Amino acid sequence: MSSHSPYSQTKLGLAVACVTAAAGCIGPGSGVAALLFGNLQPIPIESLFPHWVLGATEQRIIIARMRLPDEFEDATFDFESSLLGPPSLNGVPVDSGTDPDDYPQPTAQLVAVDRSSLETRVLFDGLQADLFGMDSDGRWLVWPDGESGELWLMDLDVDADPRRLDPPLTGQLSVREVVGGRALVMQWADNTRAWLVIDLTTGEEMLREESIQFPVMNRAGELAAFRDIPAEPETAIGDIAAGRYATRNIELIDLASGETSAVISDPSIQDANRLYLTDDTLLWVAHEYDGSASRSALFAYDLGTGVSRMVAELEGVTGSTSTHVGDVGSAGVLLDSSSGFEDFEENPLALLTVKITKSYELMSFDGSRRTVLEVAFGLFDFAAQSSDPVLIDDAAVFAHPSDGDYVVVNLESGVERRFDPFAGLD
């Protein structure tokens, strides 16, 4: 199940934006900023670039990362120079006034890691594609071409060559997720956003919807999405005063027939903005914020019985702890928690030494939890912050926060296997 969001073509400036912003928030040229960032050595710019698991099966794990052109292979980012003026990468300034097209354009490298041997096979290197707009279910790999925008497909089970989707789609395309041989695609065309479901074997368009929000699919051939029902004119004023402009329901759609099989209405859905769908269970997270802390609760709808219930309260963001749903699969819910943050406004120097503890817990659908992996890392371990965890039927895959290696944890035995998918690759 994909956990990333669709974005437009990423520019190099975005890769360093958060770092430059961190210096700016403290104050360019300030003594505190000089202490914090001036003591950091220049780092390879590619270490700031994201990499993550696109998808996995029992046979393989698909991982993608951004790459720079060869002439920028040794480029570094200098924290200290960012305090005195716009930093540069091999003479190319990185600031808000620079035309993004002047930046070197990153490409994608995709590898397949064998689940048994952990050996890496390069699928593509230098692929002109939107890294944030591609996805895989471990068998099918789907991406929009970086130049033409056309959708390309590849069936990894049969080692087939990539092929264009036929008939082609028009407009700006982003692949939201690939599940069970189907692709959920967001299309922008003629100032209209539409969600499409494409059968990857036949190329058939199975569904087209323009008024749904945050759709997700499962392997059983169902799609769940929010649908907002506007308030009637006579009640609109009351709804606006209550901070609500519409009634939000969840619809479950059978992809084979295109018919709505269920409409779920619940007060908790009004404050939800993310759905998760397994073959048996639909889940959503409801949020509440009181101005000082956020609280969340996980709700579930049983597809077989049609019964909704609250699974568990989540910690949300409280003080120095943050908890959110990392991924959902047939084994349960993978919770991603981080703790150990200091109050940086009162003690900015803590940025240099703080150790963040990241804990991953597997929560079953009855609310019971057990820890799968726990690690500690520093705030400037940038390799740690690239990939969300991915839950497979029998295992969980993590980017290890200490150095960016990956860890596969067997959910039954607890055995951890660590690997570097890019070892030995240029």
Image: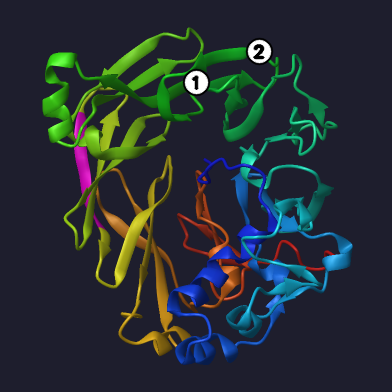
Residue position marked by numbered label 2 in the rendering: 204
Q: Residue at x 51, y 92 (%)?
A: 35
Decide whether residue 180 is among the magenta residues: no
Amino acid bearing label 2: Glu
Q: Residue at x 50, y 55 (%)?
A: 389
Quadrant in the picture for the C terminus: bottom right
Q: Mainly helix, strand or loop, the magenta region?
A: strand
Of residues 292 and 261, the one nearer the viewer is 292
Q: Residue at x 30, y 69 (%)?
A: 321
Which quarter of the picture shows residue 232? top left
Image location of residue 296, percent across then percent down: 24, 50
Q: Alpha carbon of mark 2 to alpha carbon of mark 1: how far?
A: 14 Å
Image location of residue 66, percent across then percent down: 72, 56
**Which of the labelled discs sits on residue 100, or is there none?**
none
Residue position marked by numbered label 1 in the rendering: 221
Viewer can see residue 328: yes
| Residue 139 versus residue 344 in the image, above or below | above
Q: Nearer the viewer, mark 2 or mark 1?
A: 2
**On the picture, is 302 further left or further right than 183?**
left
- The mark that comes first in sequence, 2 or 1, is 2
The magenta stretch is 308-315
Classify mark 1: residues with Cα within 10 Å, few (<14), some (14-19) or many (20+).
Answer: some
Which quarter of the picture shows residue 44? bottom right
Image location of residue 34, percent across then percent down: 53, 90
**On the picture, is 147 further left or further right than 201?**
right
**On the picture, is 224 further left or further right than 135?**
left
Amino acid bearing label 1: Gly
Which quarter of the picture shows residue 380? bottom right
Image location of residue 36, percent across then percent down: 51, 87
| Residue 76 versus residue 291 in the image, above or below | below
